[in-house]
Amino acid sequence: MKITMAHGSGGRATSQLITGIFEKNFNNDILSRMEDSAVVAGSSRLAVTTDSFVVNPLFFPGGDIGKLSVCGTVNDLLMSGACPKYLTCGFILEEGADSEELEKIAASMAQTAREAGVTIVAGDTKVIEGSGGIYINTAGVGFVPEGVQISASLCEEGDAVLVSGNLGDHHAAILSARMEITNSIVSDCAPLGEMVRSMQEAGVRIKAMRDVTRGGLATVLHEFAAASDCCVELTQSCLPVSDQVKGFCGLLGLDPLYMGNEGKMTAVVAGEDAELALSCMQKSKYGEAAAIIGHISGKERGKVLLTTPLGGIRVITELIGEGLPRIC
């Protein structure tokens, strides 16, 4: 079945689309009430986020736009120290979209939500003229435990900087799919809840966390440096990058520091807790290649510096211009 403008009319076709695909895959007591808003149990401190997903192609090695939309929103909540609980999803469907593809996307979202421990409680669907595209907006709500305070402004001299795994996998997977380059690079798209909870439960003093998506690691670390008025010093030989992605970057002139990821995070922790944090990451699902990559100093405030294998110092800027392709 192809999506038509009638599926966005609010009538019978809309109802059939909602019940036949979305309610079937996202089925739970809250969503199935089909009210204008979802009423859920609350908390004294909430983390709230929203994101939109327009990735092309819709399906790529290691994931699809549905999995991506859940992981992206869940990971944003986790980076503030919150426990993600609820998601909403809005679909914008271009006329001609394939309902079978939409069904696969919805099933993927449902599976990823179960893994992440979140419930999709509300949604919306609009159909517009076009050539079969599918776009998703998600919003997420999480509960922040008392006493948890995580912010880039808390970074200070002596803190350690870690990354949870190989850089550039998602960016390389999307670009390979778009350019029809054959390789075995797979997107890292994944929810990072187990990793964050492991560090919290172990008592790691986490200063800042950020998922490394658009703009890459370099841009995220610039945000840390600016917010804390400190210097982030990196060691190039410690940056984890797979051999395949290194080869891919060499072929196309890309730098893994600026490549997007969808299942990687960077964390700044108290220097004394660096090895504990590393152990927590490496023992968690999706964290096998985690590494300590640098530290916070007062050397050149507001800057990110990289020590090369030859001992030289390279000033790392944030991403300038568009980091093609659009990775989410």
Image (spheres, rainbow, N blue to C red):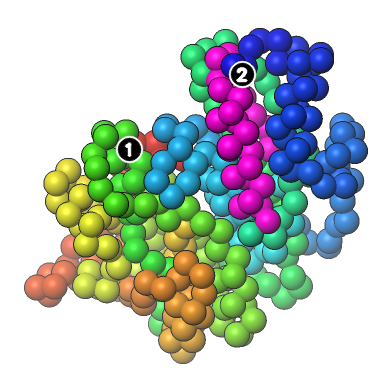
Quadrant for residue 309, please give it: bottom left
Using the image, determine if residue 310 lies above or below residue 133: below
* Cα–Cα gap, marks 1 and 2: 25 Å
Which numbered dot is residue 95?
none
Q: 131 or 233: which is nearer to us?
A: 131
Crowd around label 2: few <14 · some 14–19 · many ≥20 (10 Å): few
Numbered range of the magenta stretch: 89-114
Foreground disc of the pair 1, 2: 2
Residue 90 falls within the magenta-colored stretch: yes
Amino acid identity at mark 2:
Met
- Residue extending furthest toward the bottom: 272
Using the image, determine if residue 68 lies above or below residue 193: above
Residue 21 falls within the magenta-colored stretch: no
Q: Residue at x 22, y 69 (%)?
A: 236
Give x and y (percent) for residue 206.
55, 75
Q: 231 or 75: which is nearer to us?
A: 75
SS for dot 1 = helix
Quadrant for residue 291, please give it: bottom left
Tell me if residue 21 can be seen.
Answer: yes
Give x and y (percent) for residue 315.
22, 60
Q: Which residue position is annotated with label 2?
A: 1
Using the image, determine if residue 276 lies above or below residue 301: below
Q: Residue at x 72, y 34 (%)?
A: 22
Q: Would you say 257 lies left or right of 148 here?
A: left
Q: Which residue position is annotated with label 1?
A: 177
Q: Earlier in the sequence, mark 1 or mark 2?
A: 2
Amino acid identity at mark 1:
Ala
